Amino acid sequence: MKQAAIGSLIRTWRQRRHLSQLDLASDANISTKHLSFLETGRSQPSRDMLLHLAEHLEVPLREQNVLLVAAGYAPLFSERSLDDDDLDPAREAIQHVLHGHEPYPAIAINRHWQMIMANNCIDYFLAGVASELLTPPVNVLRLSLHPQGLAPQIVNLAAWKAHLLARLRHQIELTADGSLSELYQELAAYPTNQAHSTPIPAYHETMDIALPFALRTPHGVLSFFSTTMVFGTPIDVTVSELAIEAFFPANTATAELLRQLHAAKTSSRVSN
């Protein structure tokens, strides 16, 4: 039974990557006959072979553990809480990046887009957001696209929503995470008020290197582009699923305003 189960999982991941048996066998430098035997349960993969195939199939660490258990092996990759002492270096690295990014906003998220850390500049995004959307764990995609979240204040909402949904769809394809699929359906159903959404070409006139995130705030319209940072060689499941989203000013007006706001906030903290 284990052989059939692991074979089915290997086949599922191969098909998810849109690879034929010949494609995967060639990439992994094994025979198509051997791969066929593995998928049909006629052969049992060794632990090393399973990890070898998982590497070529770009199977996430969490799902690699699932494959190992299905084949009768012990999980290889640990999954610690981010509060675990062993993850102090990772946690400190995240905090260093977040605080070092000020005066610009930055957040750290887990695989389900739940915010686990943020720097002191994230408050610039949150004016007028419904309190229930800020109750931990805060899902940043829901926060962005919910009608009571940031959506009414996003100038280019239609384009930004399409961008976020495309990223989420790609993540679902990579991980086959059912929770993310449910989140996608929820977000896709949120309305997009075209009356408050400015066509994106207007922003390309001043920002032609990346899709901007333009947000109305009490301080004026802030325009950003974002970058994503992940750990390069993780061997812990939790660490492998962390990402830092850092927002950079897309124009000089936004950069100057953020510097002024940050200086005022810092001065206020010192005075108190």
Image (tube, rainbow, N blue to C red):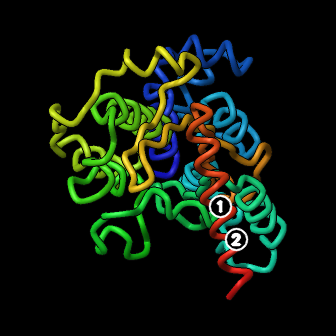
Q: Relative to 136, does residue 156 appear above or below in the rendering?
A: above
Task: Name the one closer to the observer, 135 or 61.
Answer: 135
Q: Relative to 106, does residue 34 appear above or below in the rendering?
A: above
Residue 192 lies left or right of residue 74; in this view the side is left
Task: Name the residue rendered at 25%, 53% in the picture.
Answer: 146
Q: Which residue is mark 2?
A: 266
Residue 13 appears in view: yes
Element type where label 1 sits in the image: helix
Q: Are marks 2 and 1 in contact (CB under 8 Å)?
A: yes
Structural distance between the alpha carbons of marks 2 and 1: 6 Å
Q: Which residue is mark 1?
A: 262
Residue 9 percent across, percent down from the top left: 47, 41
Task: Name the residue rendered at 44%, 35% in the picture.
Answer: 167
Q: How many numbered discs, if any?
A: 2
Q: Relative to 194, does residue 45 appear above or below in the rendering?
A: below
> Dot 1, crowdedness within 10 Å: few (<14), some or many (≥20)?
some
